[in-house]
Image: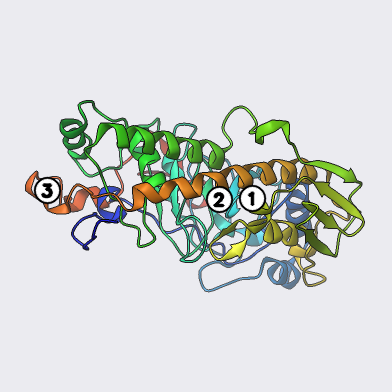
Amino acid sequence: MPSVTPDDAPPLADLMPWSVAPPRLGRRWPTAPDPASLRTRWDTLMKAEGADREALFEPTRSRTLRSAVGGLPGQTSGTQRLARASGPCPEPVRVLHAPFDEQWLIPDHRLLDAARPELWRVTDERQILVVETAEGPGPRLLATSLVPLLRPGRVRPLYRRPGGTEPNLAPGLLEHLAGRLGHLPTPEDFLAWTLAAVRPDLTVPLTGDAGLWSRGVELGGRSLWLMRRDGERPKLPGGRRPYVRAPLPTRPLDVRYDRDEETLHLDEGRISPVPPQAWDFEAAGVRVLEQWIATRTAEDEPGSLAAIRPAAWLQTWTSELLELITVLALLAEVEPQRAELETLDPVPAAELRAAGVLPVPEAARRPATVLDHHEEGPEGQFALV
């Protein structure tokens, strides 16, 4: 294994310089594993009046029923103060609630303590968001097309503008790599390499070896495809596929895993085969499958909006769980192959400094100015950003 010094590999924060803190909700009830619960929660809030509405809302220092805030970019929620608001629930949108856990959010700026509008402005069908996870077992980076709510790590969009324009990369980085590799990498190539090669300290070793680069891009590209679940459903090799072998209960309480039989038990319900590497898969220091199931079976304080949830396990959750098992098993197969990239002899950061790629200009660490559309301000006013 080659010796590695701190100067050998540049930090991700220099290679993808613009980052945003994840949105901070301030209250749990605007998110749920199903959209119907969110609509019921909203209707319950709108029917309440005075002190009852305030208690249900759960005010904080950042948001109360009287807070005046603009609309969330790209969404159609209202901007009237919630103390006197009425009307239907804004259409829930998918978000990444926890590692590999896609849930739903009421996309209303009035409900979120810190919505990060700059992140919503650039999130579209072309965008890929890189999410830093907490230190611990599992991947340090996730990739998603959804607005992520994971804390405490930073979110690094691949593009600084909507429509997949202006890569959020150190200026001149791709061109410098092209001189080494013999071809110009795309931003997506760089992202795939990063997912494959990133180290636990969030440094990213780069290479001028075209063959090694190609293997890393292929490996990271597979991780990217699995994380985003983009396109054809993934399948386990050898024709294996997890099935429900015994019906799942209406609200499973006891979750256990039989490693010998590769079976996941939810009370009397059984799913198999569940490969051990899927059950053991961790991210941000927690076992993903265990947390995913617990989120859908937990109970909240009676009388709170968060306590409004399905009375029984949903069929859609079963389908999502079966796919998640497959995704985690396939990602676990990728992980051992990353070792070669983490220990390579990298392009020194000093070389990037000599080429003028580093340090990045301060403007690259700030969001791009978006001036191509109006956004609704508080109480229906319009603002240019």
Please state if 156 lies on the left or on the right of 10 as rendered: right
Q: Which residue is mark 2?
A: 79
Nearer mark to the viewer, of 1 and 3: 3
Q: Nearer the viewer, residue 272 or 283?
A: 272
Q: Quadrant of residue 322?
A: top right
Q: Amino acid at mark 1?
A: Ile
Hey, what amino acid is under mark 2? Answer: Thr
Element under disc 3 = helix
Sooner in the amino-acid sequence: mark 2 or mark 1: 2
**Secondary structure under the numbered disc 1 in the rendered image:** loop
Which of the pair 381/37 is nearer the observer? 37
Query: Which callout, 3 or 2, points at the residue further toward the start of the chain?
Result: 2
Asked whether residue 289 appears in the rendered view, the answer is yes
The residue at which mark 1 appears reads as: 106
Hey, which residue is sitting farthest front in the picture?
1
Dot placed on the residue nearer the N-terminal end, 1 or 3 = 1
Q: Which residue is mark 3?
A: 351
Is mark 1 in CB contact (under 8 Å) with mark 3?
no
Q: CA distance from mark 2 to mark 1?
A: 14 Å
Q: Position of residue 226 (x, y in %)?
A: 56, 39
Work out which quarter of the rendered image holds the C terminus and state it: top left
